[in-house]
Image (tube, grey):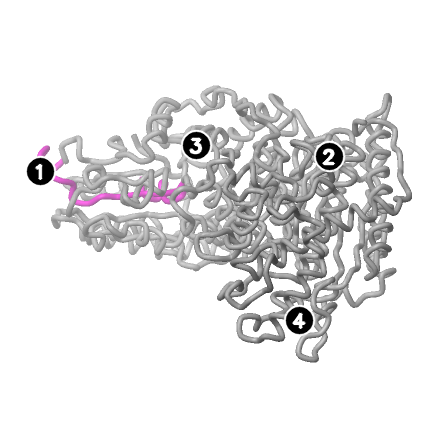
Amino acid sequence: MTMTDAPTEQTTIDDDEVAALDRWWRAANYLTVGQIYLQANPLLHEPLASEHIKPRLLGHWGTSPGLNLVYTHLNRVIRAHDLDMLFVAGPGHGGPAVLANVYLEGTYSEVYPDVSRDAGGMLRLFRQFSTPGGVPSHVSAPTPGSIHEGGELGYALIHAFGAVLDAPEMIAACVIGDGEAETGPLEGSWKGIAFLDPARDGAVLPILHLNGYKIGGPTVLGRRPPEQVAALLEAHGYEPHLVAGDDPATVHRRLAQVLDAGIARIRRIQHEARGPGAAPSGVPRWPAIILATPKGWTGPAVVDGVRVEGTFRSHQVPLAGVRSNPEHLAMLEAWMRSYRPDELFEPDGRPVRALIEQAPVGERRMGSNPAANGGLAPDPLVVPDWRDYTVEIASPGAERHESTRRLGELLRDVLAAQDTFRFFCPDETNSNRLGAAFEVTDRMSMEHVVPDDDHVSSTGRVMEVLSEHLCHGWLEGYTLTGRHGLFATYEAFAMVSASMTVQHAKWLEATHELAWRRPVPSFNVLLTSTCWRNDHNGFSHQGPGLINTVLNQRASVSRVYFPPDANCLLSVADHCLRSRDYVNLIVIDKQPQLQYLSAADAEAHCGAGDGIWHWAGTEAGEGSDGSYDPGAPPDVVLACIGDIPTMETLAAADLLRRWVPGMRVRVVNVVDLMRIRPAADHPHGTSPAEFASLFTDDTHVVVAFHGYPGAVHGLLHGQGDTDRFHVHGYREQGTTTTPFDMVVLNEMSRYHLAADAVARSRRHLSGASELADHCEAMLAKNHDHTRSHFTDLPEIADWTWPG
């Protein structure tokens, strides 16, 4: 039956089905406990002894029985209804539970043949868990079927929604721990149903697991009456179903009934939305499950006279002294034998046939779902030729254009070309000059549309929601399942979701070590409304911190680009959209800015990542004082990284050209920030010879950088004499002021750069002192002008390159 067929609903299961479900659940629980404790004797063929116990006991038991229970029942509904289902485990510290299930279903042994479904493979499964050279304790990249690392809580439901966008047959079953439910991102993520179109998207089935406790105390929702928790989900727009209890047979029956009802409800919603003549009718009431079972269920009830099962004490390792305490050792053996492993596994360790037959077949197994390995959109992204969107350049630095508006036109046609590309932005698409997208699509919303709305519909492909967490996480789920997209946000507020950027980078870093993991589309972030041009919004909107965050990730993943104009932006964006397995950070402002390079020059410049702008320097021509020596090195190098730094650097070069005509000035522009790193540290880094060809071996370099100066100093480490680099950048000086006053406050203005260049020059030349005096006078003059006229001096605000 396909997802568009009329729904059916099973309301009861018989005793044999209850026994079958309980059999799988017991097996998964047994394997979970074994991973936490055992390094030998995996099938308990002999009495448990202290030497069979790992020397370091790591892992989390408390959430695992609930995860095992849900996985067990999802297997049943997958087989019963032929479902295409992903499993997203919010309590990622329940890693041994998910590993146990993908091992039982056979996926794990297919991916890792040495962990075979026999006694030897079971022993490897146990020994590798949370041990050196083994696998992490969380559900993470090495876990087949996973698109979610649950170490940092809060993102499970967001990832689930991102995964099912444009995947109409997919259901993402998402288990949310009641501890995770306390986080801000998770609380915001319930709103995902307002952006889910049942006609073209899949479905998310949230399963809120209330086991009552975090690591050291109670959870908020765990202490609430069930009707209040249900009311919360109802207020979010869901149809909640409660499953509660501590008797396994009763819970099995009730959970099976609720899951069947939930699947039937999902099918009904999709059937109605996809039928002939169907029209949007608001946000459907999607099902959600509230599962209330004891924390550490079926584990030790009391240890050393203290309650453990059903309390926070079962969160990690309930029996901590097993190697040294005979009573604890006996309790562990009794605990493991309570699952009756001799009924679950053959003497050689193979799961009994009755267990194997309970697993779905092939790619219907949740551990084998291709979507969890970047498999939903295997075809390359269709990107039009970016050269069709470029700005004509008659002369460098003569005209101003909004660079991101040209990118918006390119994105418009990417959106029009395929249905596996989405744009994510916190209510700022027009503000960021990317509104051309609305020529081919709308803002997506399932809420009712009123006449005053602008480009809002249920079919939109622009995902605008005022939450960086949701935009970020939706794109993560979307790209990890194989589709492409772009996340654009104000630069300062990218820090709201910066830890998500870190976690996604860590995921990609881990996948690079797994040959079986397919490359996935890169995570592309466009930072606009940058610190230098948020002069109107003030200090709160001024912060380039995400640059440093990305720079701290491994070289195999991190990429940071500073295109100085529209044509460079288009070239960089084309590369980033097509790339895979990177975190690409593109930084450029949305305001009108000077344009420098033709399409051909931009392609060459961005392809190299950096280069000397000979037209801007004075190395290639004779100075007016006749002192030019074609064989001599430059007196100073001006380097610029970023759009505003580029403009200020060129203005400084213009000052030097006019006031100190005998100075040999080299101008270097860097687009790919990683180019200033040594080649040994980054694949895009430069060799000593390449670095010297740009910056010489001994000339002082005055650098204008978009972000924090310390970032450049850190990247330069290992590039010879780095004391000769003098970096001007954002120094946490800001307020509501004029654009030029922002660069003045941070000492990155043309006058600061020119004065520094004079001070650092290899030679002291005629006109240098006069220029220094001029710079000081102009800074004072502009200060007075801005305070009296509230604008920058015309000769500053309207400056263009005099070429």
Q: Identify residue for label 4.
A: 313
Residue depicted at 73% across the width and 34% down the height? 202
The magenta stretch is 624-650
Q: Position of residue 583 (x, y in %)?
A: 47, 41
- Label 1 to label 4, Cα distance in Å? 81 Å
Q: Position of residue 275 (x, y in %)?
A: 85, 24
Q: Nearer the viewer, residue 525 or 48?
A: 48
Graded by Cα atoms within 10 Å as few (under 14), some (14 to 19) or many (20 or more), the crowding at tag 3 reads many
User: Any mark on residue 216, and which?
Assistant: none
Which label's residue is closer to the chain start, 3 or 4?
Answer: 4
User: Any mark on residue 202, and which?
Assistant: 2
Marks 2/1 in contact by CB < 8 Å: the verdict is no
Q: Is residue 718 above or below residue 224?
A: above
Give amino acid for label 1: Ser
Q: Which SS class for mark 3?
A: helix
Which label's residue is closer to the chain start, 1 or 3?
Answer: 3
Give amino acid for label 3: Val
Q: Which SS class for mark 4?
A: helix
- Is residue 88 left or right of 561 when viewed as pictured? right
- Label 2 to label 4, Cα distance in Å? 38 Å
Q: Is residue 632 magenta?
A: yes
Residue depicted at 76% across the width and 60% down the height? 210
Give amino acid for label 2: Gly
Which label's residue is closer to the chain start, 1 or 4?
Answer: 4
Quadrant in which the N terminus is drawn: top right
- Is residue 1 left or right of 300 when viewed as pictured? right
Which circle, 1 or 3, is nearer the viewer? 3
Q: Identify residue for label 1.
A: 627
Give amino acid for label 4: Arg
Q: Identify residue for label 3.
A: 572
Quadrant in which the C terminus is drawn: top left
